[in-house]
Each structure stands twice: as structure tokens, then as C-alpha cells.
Image (tube, rainbow, N blue to C red):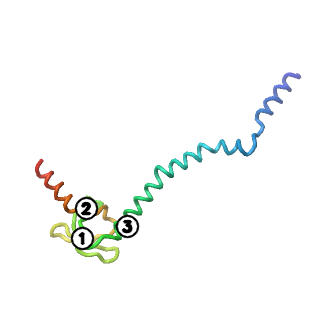
Amino acid sequence: MFFETAAYAQQAGAAAPQGAMGGLMSFMPIILMVLIFYFLLIRPQQKRQKQHAAMLEALKAGDTVLTNAGIIGTISSVDGNIMVVDLGGTKVRMIKGYIADKIDPNTLNTVTEAVKEK
């Protein structure tokens, strides 16, 4: 009977809380994962969103753009959030947010020639 009581006392002593530092150390892997997600996923995405918003604000008539649908055209006019994009004879009204990127016309000509050669 004495041995059973002593064994129970040892188990109860081992399970005693280690203080505030022990609780913090158990959450350390979770905190570390949140920091990793922030620096590898969230922060770069926020940076890309800011760059895209700045590019959209800088668009003007005459710029060559790529739409989210993969269509390349030239901006004819910009009126607030709406722009008219010339697709080679056909003019389409678009919302600014659907512009994926601004394209350098010189680069575009080089790519077009390379595709024609194949």
C-alpha cells in the first residue's frame, strides 16, 4: 500500500505546472509558424498588391496593356475607373481592375516575331 501511494505522489509531482515559461514554450511552434507564414506568404502578397495598384493608377492613353483574359490592347482613353482599350480595330470598355500588366511595346514586337518564326 505504501508503494502505491509513493508512486502516485511521484506522478502527481511530475505533472505539476512548470510556471509561465513552460506554457509559453508549448505555444512557441505555433508562434513560429505564424511568423513564417507572414514573411513567406502574406507580406510578399501585400507588396504585389501595392505595386499593381500603383501600376493601375499610372496608366494613361497610349499604354499597351495585358488584360486578365490574356488580351493585349492599347488604351484609347481613361475616365476614372473605366477605360477604353483598342484591340486592333475593336474598342472595348473595361474596368481598370481587370488590367493584369502594362507591356513594353518593343518587347511585345520581339515576342510576336519569335512566335511567327516558329
- Looking at the rendered structure, the secondary structure element under dot 1 is strand
- Looking at the image, the residue that sits furthest to the left is 117
Which residue is depicted at the point 16% across and 55% down?
112
Amino acid type, residue under disc 1 in the picture:
Ile
Which residue is depicted at the point 22% across and 71% down?
62
Decide which of 88, 53 is in the foreground and name it: 53
Q: Which residue is mark 3?
A: 54
Task: Determine whether 44 is above or below 8 in the image.
Answer: below
Amino acid type, residue under disc 2 in the picture:
Ile
Decide which of 20, 73 is in the foreground and name it: 20
- Looking at the image, the residue that sits furthest to the bottom is 79
Relative to 12, is 100 on the left or the right?
Answer: left
Q: Which mark is residue 75?
A: 1
Q: Position of residue 21 (x, y in %)?
A: 71, 44
Indicate which label's residue lies in the foreground, 2 or 1. 2
Q: Position of residue 28 (x, y in %)?
A: 62, 44
- Looking at the rendered structure, the secondary structure element under dot 3 is helix
Decide which of 24, 4 is in the foreground and name it: 24
Relative to 108, is 35 on the left or the right?
Answer: right
Task: Determine whether 43 is above or below 77 in the image.
Answer: above
Q: Which residue is mark 2?
A: 103
Which residue is depicted at the point 66% across and 42% down?
25
Task: Find the distance from the CA under tag 2 to the CA under tag 1.
Answer: 11 Å
> Which of disc 1 and disc 3 is earlier in sequence?
3
